[in-house]
Image (cartoon, coloured by chain):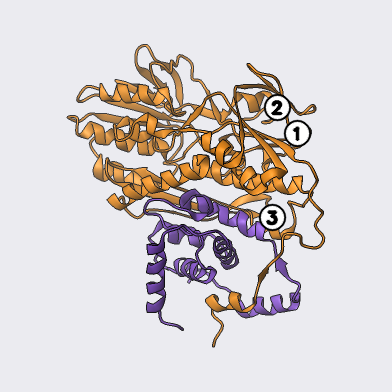
Amino acid sequence: MKHRSKPLYLLILLMLAGPGFAQDPTIDRMIAAQCAQCHSTDGHATGDIDSIAGKETRDLYDKLIDMKEEDRAEDIMEHQAWGYTDEQLYRIARYYSTVAEDGDEDEEDEDEEDREDEDDD
Amino acid sequence: MSINRRNFIMATGIAAAASSAPGMLRAQTGSARVVVVGGGFGGATAAKYLKHWGGNKVEVTLIDPKTRHTSCVMSNLVLNNELALNDLRFGYGDLTSKYGVQIIKDTVSRIDPGGRVLTLKNQAPVNYDMLVLAAGISFKKPKGWNARKNPHAWIAGNQTNLLKKQLQAMPAGGTFVMTIPRSPYRCPPGPYERACLVADMVKSNGGGRVVILDANDDIQAEKETFSRAYSQLYGNIVEYYPGAETGFVDSNAGVVETSLGDFAGDVINIIPTQRAGGLVRKAGLTDGGLWAPVDVTTYESSLAGYEDIHIIGDAQGSGQPKSAHMANAQAKICADAILRKVASQPTDHPERLQNITTNSACYSPITRNTASWLTAVFQYDIDSNAMALAHIAEAGEWTRDNYSEMFDWANNLFGDTWG
């Protein structure tokens, strides 16, 4: 694996930072805006590129991490994910969850089915 | 449950701050006047995002000489008739109707940095509080060169149609000559991709030669892909000459003189050495050089005396690759910085500096129905005060799927910029 995260270290660091530790959502936005070059403004992509507007933070984050963890990345999006820190990927996912989703109900239903099929760790 | 990557961030309960975090100054009353020069990928994106994120805190005016911008992105597909140039023209209507950007159709002839005034060619001068320059490139013209005979087609528009016409009329067995300038130039993979498409056209037109005269020592982007394409697909058509510096261009005789000798062609495409456009250079913003030095955390000029003048896109010299996709990316960092300045918020605190990131992605047609891609991510490095490459990759193969995705990428980029 090309990336070594230190979850325990970071967990401790964040706990030490105290309950007042907060993050600026406009910085979430600034990072996430870089996705718009392919996924369009606020993630409302058209054509065969996935719309990411209004996706749940957890789902989008999991997908991004999966792509980043792909050792034999072949897809352009997998390679994009490699370029960001885990925290940035989280902030991106958090931003898109705050955006109104596209009005496509069929797409929503498909996502529900996918979630049911996934095994929980 | 063991801590794994997925769970740890959720478990620590990072909470998003409310917009009025303690310690931040209140936004100033009244709106700041931001003027954007240039309605291409950089300028349009900057104008749009300033309003999209800033609302009434900023009054944004976009100045461009034309009512529509013609995209260079995808313009090589005009050459082989896959697209019409009109498919690549974008007006500013949505910027106004959706975001409230004011448009002035005119050319900026002079910048007065002290007085914060722009002199226009036809209309009254325009004042600004903050200025964003996104006016693109100009060329260092080789001696003898006549662009009407040997088009560059490196700023899309009539030049693109001219080159297309010439290519369509090229005789079977004819020779296409293309010169590539020393890096940095706009769109690193662009010339090599154009050579592929022309080779493809030549191949189905009874053969011929595609002569690439590259001033660089090697292929500047997607080296693996293009090398393989030239040898596997176009082996008896493409001739690649690295280290060929263009000297005199005899546009009348159809001959390019280079450091490696003279090359004659039926169609000659001169892609000249590039530099920041005239407005930026004449204002002193390149400090006598080719490109404007900027602070990559804001895109403000790093030269003294030019406060609140930001340069984005091809004309700035941050070392990031020059492309439409990157200009759009930079515009967002710039817009964020300007809005923070307007609100008297810092742009150089750790949380922001740790998250200044831009990305590049583009697809290159390799044949009339397959394409490759290139992608890169840059992150701000505080030690070098520069954008550092975090990751770069090219497609393993050229495919029809990539060719189809290319249109989706382009359409979304166009929409994000002008829509």
Q: Does residue B232 appear in the picture of this structure? A: yes
Task: Count every numbered label the image shows and give the total.
Answer: 3
Instruction: Decide which of tag 1 and tag 3 comes sooner along the chain.
Output: 1
Where does label 1 land, which residue? B306
The chain letter for the residue carrying disc 1 is B
Three-letter residue code for mark 2: Gly
Do badges 1 and 2 share one subunit? yes
Instruction: Decide which of tag 2 and tag 3 comes sooner along the chain.
Output: 2
Q: Position of residue A10 (x, y in %)?
A: 65, 75
Instruction: Decide which of tag 1 and tag 2 comes sooner along the chain.
Output: 2
Q: Residue at x 56, y 42 (%)?
A: B98
Q: Quadrant of residue B211?
A: top left
Do badges 1 and 3 share one subunit? yes
Residue B284: numbered disc: 2
Q: Quadrant of residue B32?
A: top right
Q: Secondary structure at mark 3?
A: loop
> Looking at the image, do the residues carrying marks 2 and 3 touch, with CB atoms under 8 Å apart?
no
Which residue lies most toward the left here?
Answer: B206
Toward the viewer: B155 or B53? B53
Q: Tell me, what hue is chain A?
A: purple
For the residue carrying disc 1, how many other residues have a C-alpha within 10 Å: few (<14), some (14-19), or many (20+)? some
Q: Which chain is orange?
A: B
Q: Position of residue B210 (x, y in %)?
A: 30, 31
Q: Residue at x 43, y 15 (%)?
A: B146
Q: Secondary structure at mark 1?
A: loop
The chain letter for the residue carrying disc 3 is B
Label 1 and label 3: CA atoms lie apart by 23 Å
Where does label 3 land, which residue? B382
Say above or below: A103 vs B364: below
Q: Position of residue B165 (x, y in %)?
A: 31, 22
